[in-house]
Amino acid sequence: QVQLVESGGGLVQAGGSLRLSCAASGRTFSNSAMAWFRQAPGKEREFVAGITGINSSTRVADSVKGRFTISRDNAKNTVYLQMNSLKPEDTAVYYCADRVSSIVIWTTPTRYDYWGQGTQVTVSS
């Protein structure tokens, strides 16, 4: 059974940092494209950052470029999202997603095969 479990969310003041983790289990993820999405109340789920498995190429949304960094440790089946200089508009539930055997980082949620349960990030002003 494939599972993605996010952790690391919480409450932080504007300008602060958090690091999210997504631990994957149930199969080998080294050839998967992994991504982080977020969803704020009343808004659609949006792409934040993604990373391929083979060469760890990355793609980051313009709204977080220069502030967020995605990385992965295939030996630990874990993907990370380092979030710096957080803003109140970053407040959302953050989800980890997995697309099996993909060398493309898709920004559309429907392209992903597995999802975590989400972790809440709240940034106070």
Image (tube, rainbow, N blue to C red):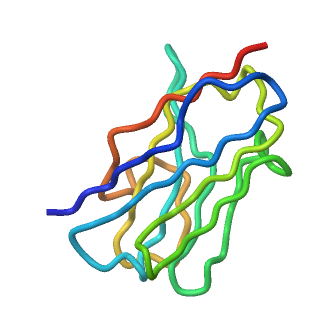
**Residue at figure coordinates x 21%, y 62% from the top left:** 2
Is residue 71 left or right of 77 when viewed as pictured?
right
The x and y percentages for residue 112 are 38, 56
Q: Position of residue 111 (x, y in %)?
A: 40, 56
What residue lies at 56% left-to-right and 48% top-to-bottom?
20
Describe residue 57's horizontal placement relative to residue 85 as left or right. Answer: left
Residue in the foreground of this view, choosing between 61 and 22:
22
Q: Is residue 28 left or right of residue 83?
A: left
Query: Total label count?
Result: 0
Location of residue 87 (image quadrant): top right
| Residue found at the very far bottom of the displayed protein | 54
Residue depicted at x 71% and y 55%: 60
Q: Residue furthest left?
A: 1
Front position in the image: 86 or 53 = 86
**Viewer-proximal residue, 105 or 9?**
9
The C terminus lies in quadrant: top right
Q: Residue 1's spot in the image, x, y percent?
A: 14, 63
Above/below status of 100 relative to 43: below
Residue 116 vertical placement versus 72 (above, below)? above
Q: Is residue 24 above or below residue 11?
A: below
Q: Is residue 20 left or right of residue 77?
A: right
Front residue of 116 and 11: 11
Q: Position of residue 83 (x, y in %)?
A: 71, 45
Q: What residue do we see at 66% from left, 41% from top?
A: 18
